[in-house]
Image (spheres, rainbow, N blue to C red):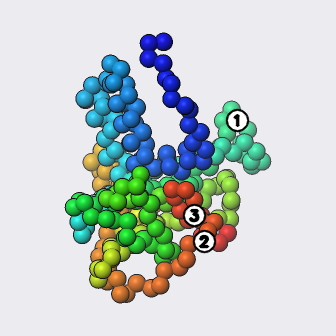
Amino acid sequence: MRYPFEHPLIDWGDRLHGQFALPYYLHLDLQFVLADLAAYGLSLGDALTNLLLDDARYEIGSVEWQGVQIRILSALEFWPLIGDATAQPRSDSRLIDASTARIELRLTALNESNVNDWKLRINGVAAYFDSALNHTTTCLAGIRYRCFTPYIGLHPKMPALDRVNLILEPPNSALALELTVFEWQPQGGAYPGLPANLAEARNRRRERLVIAEIAAATLPKAKSMPVSAINNFYFDMRRILKC
């Protein structure tokens, strides 16, 4: 072997389903892989590298507010295979419970300020940010939730969320920012059909995020986050809903 790999292997444990579900960490890991390939003469070239590192396709929406870039991105979710559901039809395939979704909320300071002291509420429940790799200018929060109730699936009595409401409170500010991510169109009801083109599909995706400034003084007291809902790198909103 011309270039033997001499570093020890890493046992990531449950971080595989926590940290590496978030686009931020996947992007960093891919950068490392591509840089390692280039270091040994196996570069993919600028065009393909830039295409692979472009995470715009994961973005639900973004906004710049009070010197901070705020992005909401679709994250990975690991759907369980249902192999023992008695009601599933006999076939060569097995059902997958796809009723759980995950998103990443990312704050990046545009002026080198500290964003770790921003407060966060998720559906009225007090949450917090984790600094990304100890960087004070970027912080993250993962949110996991049930997005629909399947006909056949796990936890049949667990209700679904049709929206995720996020409220950001900067320190020493009279204003807060409310971001509501709708699972379907905000007006309710179904779309008239499939999007006619890529532009319409992108517009439907953008309209799922509704942004509004609100007076911080009008906010009610936030509820406490249950310990069972706090996991490494994400908050599990399914643990807050009563089944």
Local SS, label 1: loop
What separation in Å lies between label 2 and label 3 (alpha carbons)? 7 Å
Name the N-terminal-most of marks 1 and 3.
Answer: 1
Q: Inspect this view and state whether residue 106 appears.
A: no
User: Who is closer to the viewer here, 78 or 6?
Assistant: 6
Label 1 with label 2: CB-CB less than 8 Å: no
Using the numbered discs, state the Cα–Cα distance from disc 1 to disc 2 in whole angstroms: 41 Å
Q: Distance between the residues labelled 1 and 3?
A: 38 Å
Question: Residue 32, located in which quarter of the rendered image?
Answer: top left
Q: Are marks 2 and 3 in contact (CB under 8 Å)?
A: yes
Which residue in the protein does label 1 denote? 91
Residue placed at 43% from the left, 46% from the top?
Answer: 25
Which of the 4 quarters of the picture holds residue 136? bottom left
Position of residue 46 measured from the top left corner of the image (x, y, whole percent): 25, 29
Q: Position of residue 9 (x, y in %)?
A: 56, 32
Crowdedness near tag 1: few (<14), some (14–19) or many (≥20) residues, C-alpha within 10 Å? few
Residue placed under numbered mark 3 in the picture: 230
Q: Is residue 25 visible in this depiction of the protein? A: yes
What residue type is disc 3 on? Ile
Is residue 100 shown above or below 228? above
